[in-house]
């Protein structure tokens, strides 16, 4: 199999169009935060849009022992992060997975994720009919200088 490195948008449109059409979910601007040596967790961020009402129910990646869909939210003046059982994908509406909000958390990393690496991520989306579809992604890693999670007062976070 030939390996090609291109931007995530080009990669998705060129290689995964049949998968996306079947799952009826499009993915834009996907990236994973690169890590430093010995770091055991990082986040994956992207924009999801579903043609029909659906929900993101899980994610997997061979680079991590545990992968969960997380949310960050202000609770009592403290920013908290926690796993969610699913994330609604309302028909036709873009849902942002971004630092400081919803994101895919990659934990128990099996090695360092370096700037420029390509990280395989599989999203599992469930339609309102209960049928599940997998969306296979090859997500570029960006240096830690990419937009950081804001742990401040939370006023910039929208859910």
Image (cartoon, grey):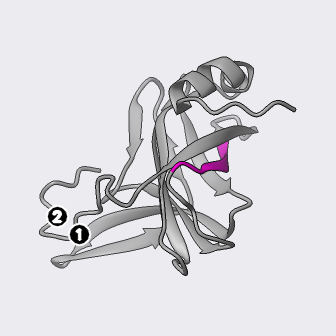
In magenta stretch: residue 117? yes
Q: Which residues are magenta?
A: 116-125
Q: Can residue 50 be seen?
A: no
Picture layout, residue 106 above or below residue 51: below
Residue 55 position by quadrant: top right
Q: Is 155 on the left or on the right of 145, as rendered?
A: left
Residue 90: image location, x then y, percent: 46, 33
The nearer-to-camera label among 1 and 2 is: 2
Q: Nearer the viewer, residue 115 or 151?
A: 115
Residue 132 position by quadrant: top right
Q: Secondary structure at mark 1?
A: strand
Picture layout, residue 33 above or below residue 24: below
Q: Main secondary structure of the magenta part?
A: strand
Q: Residue at 69% of width from left, 25% of height from top? A: 16
State the quadrant of the N terminus: top right
Residue under label 2, please give it: 154
Q: Can residue 15 be seen?
A: yes
Question: Of label 1 and label 2, which has the lower sequence position?
Answer: 1
Residue 23: image location, x then y, percent: 68, 29
Residue under label 1, please give it: 74
In magenta stretch: residue 104? no
Local crowd at mark 1 within 10 Å, few (<14), some, or many (≥20)? some
Q: Residue at 38% of width from left, 72% of height from top? A: 81
Number of labelled discs? Answer: 2
Q: Nearer the viewer, residue 137 or 87?
A: 137
Verify CB contact (< 8 Å) between mark 1 and mark 2.
Answer: yes
Q: Residue at 15% of width from left, 70% of height from top? A: 152
Q: Is 110 on the left or on the right of 140, as rendered?
A: right
Residue 9: image location, x then y, percent: 52, 26
Q: Is 139 on the left or on the right of 142, as rendered?
A: right
Q: Secondary structure at mark 2?
A: loop
């Amino acid at each position: 199999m030939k390996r090609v490195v291109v931007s995530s948008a080009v990669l998705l449109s060129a290689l995964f169009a049949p998968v996306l059409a079947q799952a009826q979910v499009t993915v834009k601007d996907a990236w994973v935060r690169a890590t430093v040596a010995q770091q055991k967790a990082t986040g994956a961020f992207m924009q999801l849009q579903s043609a029909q009402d659906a929900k993101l129910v899980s994610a997997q990646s061979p680079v991590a022992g545990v992968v969960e869909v997380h949310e960050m939210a202000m609770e009592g003046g403290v920013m908290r992060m926690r796993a969610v059982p699913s994330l609604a994908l309302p028909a036709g509406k873009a849902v942002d997975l971004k630092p400081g909000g919803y994101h895919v958390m990659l934990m128990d990393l099996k090695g360092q994720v370096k700037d420029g690496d390509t990280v395989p991520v599989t999203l599992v989306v469930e339609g309102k009919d209960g049928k599940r579809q997998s969306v296979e992604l090859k997500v570029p890693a960006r240096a830690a200088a990419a937009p950081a999670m804001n742990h401040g007062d939370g006023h910039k976070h929208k859910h």
